[in-house]
Image (cartoon, helix red, strand yellow):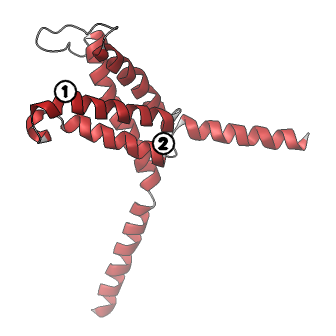
Amino acid sequence: MIEEEEEGERTMRTILEKWQNRAPELQSILRIVAAFMFMQAGTMKLFAFPVGIFPNGGTVSLMSELGLAAVLEVFGGGLMLLGFLTRPVAFVLSGEMAVAYFQAHFPHGFWPVLNGGQPAIFYCFAWLYFSSAGPGPWSLDVLWRRYRTIGRGAERQS
């Protein structure tokens, strides 16, 4: 009986260790999913896709603050999706979301659940995290780093 309990504990530890070893891949998945969702806010503003902005379903003027936000969301989100220039892009997007929260949501009340600011706060801190942690292993940044490392090795050998 005691041996069965010990084996069960070892199995649980093994499962937990394997799960914890997946953290880098899950970091990449979080970046990809968050970027895909983020881009939708921009495509809605710029292209009325998948739906236009409320109430009339239109788009924003490109030469406006919302137009700038839309460009950052579409193109910055695309770079985040690919994991290219992740740290600087994530830092800029984090700042964009902080500005969005304090300009558009905070004036309507303190509590984010009441002022509609939950997505802005989430993205602000998610992008801030990626600006520090990097993109994870599934990214163009990692491929680029590998390519540059291989290129330097080839230069030294010749």
In terms of image quadrants, where is residue 141? top right
Front residue of this view, candidates 96 and 51: 96
Disc nearest the viewer among 1 and 2: 1
The residue labelled by disc 2 is 135
On the image, the x and y values in percent for residue 30 come to 37, 43
Q: How many marks?
A: 2
- On residue 149, the disc is none
Q: Please give left or right for residue 102 compared with residue 39 in the image.
A: left
On the image, the x and y values in percent for residue 40 come to 29, 23
- At 43% from the left edge and 37% from the top edge, which residue is drawn? 91
Q: Secondary structure at mark 1?
A: helix
Q: Residue furthest right?
A: 158
- At 34% from the left edge and 36% from the top edge, which residue is drawn? 33
Quarter of the picture containing the N terminus is bottom left
In terms of image quadrants, where is residue 152? top right
User: Compared to 2, does 101 lie above or below?
Assistant: above
Pointers 1 and 2 in contact (C-beta within 8 Å) = no
On the image, the x and y values in percent for residue 26 come to 40, 49
Q: Residues within 10 Å of mark 2 (few under 14, many from 20)?
A: many
The residue labelled by disc 1 is 104
- At 12% from the left edge and 8% from the top edge, which residue is drawn? 56
Q: Please give left or right for residue 80 compared with residue 156 in the image.
A: left
Q: Amino acid at mark 1?
A: Ala
On the image, the x and y values in percent for residue 158 come to 91, 39
Q: Secondary structure at mark 2?
A: loop
- At 36% from the left edge and 83% from the top edge, which residue is drawn? 7
Q: Earlier in the sequence, mark 1 or mark 2?
A: 1
User: Compared to 41, does 17 lie above or below?
Assistant: below
